[in-house]
Image: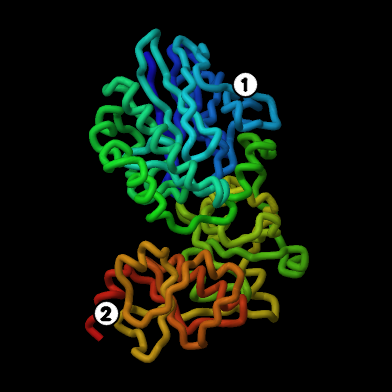
Amino acid sequence: MMQVFPVRDTGLGNTSYVVDLGDGSALVVDPERDPRPYVEVADRQRLVIRHVAETHLHADFVSGARELVAVGASLIAPRRSALAHPHRGVAEGDELAVGDLTLQVLETPGHTPEHVAYLLKDGSNPRVLFSGGTLMTGGVARPDLISDADTVPLAHQAFWSVRRLLESIPAEVEVRPTHGAGSFCSAPGAEHPEMTTVGVERATHPAMTTPDEDAFVDQLLGVLGSYPGYFLRLREVNRLGPKVYGVDLRPLPRIRPEDLGEVHTIVDVRPIERFAEGHIPGSISIALRDQFGTWLGWLLAPDSRLAFVLDADQDERELIRQTLNVGNENIMGRLDLAEWKTTDQGLATIDLVSPADIDPAASILDVRQDAEWTGGHVPGAVHVELGDLADGTANMGPGTVVHCGHGQRAMTAASLLARAGNPPAAVIPADFSEIQRAATVS
């Protein structure tokens, strides 16, 4: 009996799928770089991964397709992807036998020009549509990741691709998108669930409910925000074929303080409270959490030579996974803060303040995304998205207090400013609603 097992990456807002094909084999759809989650699901279900399918050239993560090919799978990918590594290129109308089932290929440009969806059928009965980024729960993936010239045409193609799928496939068929809410590949309005149905989307999807094609395109293009710069290079990384690491990665080697001349950037992944208490001067705070990889890839050049500072109880393997997943390959090792303390270079600190203790005369820097700022902000605050601080050009005064929605992005911003010679006065590690209430009361 066919079963679909979702493997969700909360930080990227993406879901990959392991599919039991009924004969002891498995298909994996749109895998991220680390093969372990898919291998572990297959092992638990006593399946062998025989096939891996890509819906498009991914911009937000390095594909794990080659990792699964290395353990015995065959790769299926859109012919228009022009992959430079072994695969079976497919196009509109192709049907492939996978286990006891059939995979039908439907060309669905919109998110990308080469995009396809896969309709999994049991005999002549459609069962599941793997829709990638073209048809998502309540929305579509953004069409502006190729070029300015392609954005409007792709938005129009997205409209017709969604309409085609929803009008031609039976209502009871499950829809399993790759992108979802929280993904910078998603246009605002997309929802979180990794499963919907054709019938639900036929009744509610904007491509079906907006007055016409132009209204859909105008609505889609009117809500697109910023996205990480690494999105513009990972498509080519995936086309050419990323390096294969395998299931077992070596631990991070230790780096001595005296060897730091070989390291370009120190990234401190400890909780922000620990960073505030004391950190290596010039280090960048990016707390290890679900969104760690996104911010690492957004803020640091792909050729940066990275040394990490971790607490003893933090997951080194998760750090490596997220770093490689966004294509930053130069992982040099980890620094022991206790060893650093024995040098004569000392530690830097930064103050944490509560919303109630903000000096009314202080300059306030808000580093949230544009949509968050538009939804409400502190009167008089300066707004610069965190991603725009990466080049160190923001000229903020020494009394600046930085905030975001909870504190992690604000601490990253503070560390970037300090590294550029503009140390802020403090960071507010609080929920934005608390900050807003305090500002209103004052």
**Residue under the point 57% across and 28% down:** 78
**Residue under the point 39% across and 38% down:** 159
Identify which residue, 184 or 253, lies in the foreground: 184
Relative side of 436 to 290, left or right: left
Identify which residue, 394 or 287, lies in the foreground: 394
In the image, is residue 174 above or below residue 191? above
Q: Is residue 273 visible?
A: no
Dot 2 crowding, Cα within 10 Å, few <14, some 14–19, many 20+: some
Q: Position of residue 441 (x, y in %)?
A: 22, 83
Mark linked to residue 72: none
Identify which residue, 139 or 251, lies in the foreground: 139
Q: In the rendered image, which quarter contains the N terminus?
A: top left
**Residue under the point 24% across and 80% down:** 440
Relative side of 280 to 115, left or right: right
Q: Is residue 358 visible?
A: yes
Q: Under tag 2, what secondary structure? A: helix
Q: Position of residue 298 (x, y in %)?
A: 56, 58
Dot 1 crowding, Cα within 10 Å, few <14, some 14–19, many 20+: few
Mark linked to residue 88: 1
Q: Which residue is mark 2?
A: 438
Q: Position of residue 19 (x, y in %)?
A: 44, 23
Q: In the image, what residue type sits under mark 1?
A: Arg
Q: Position of residue 182 (x, y in %)?
A: 40, 50
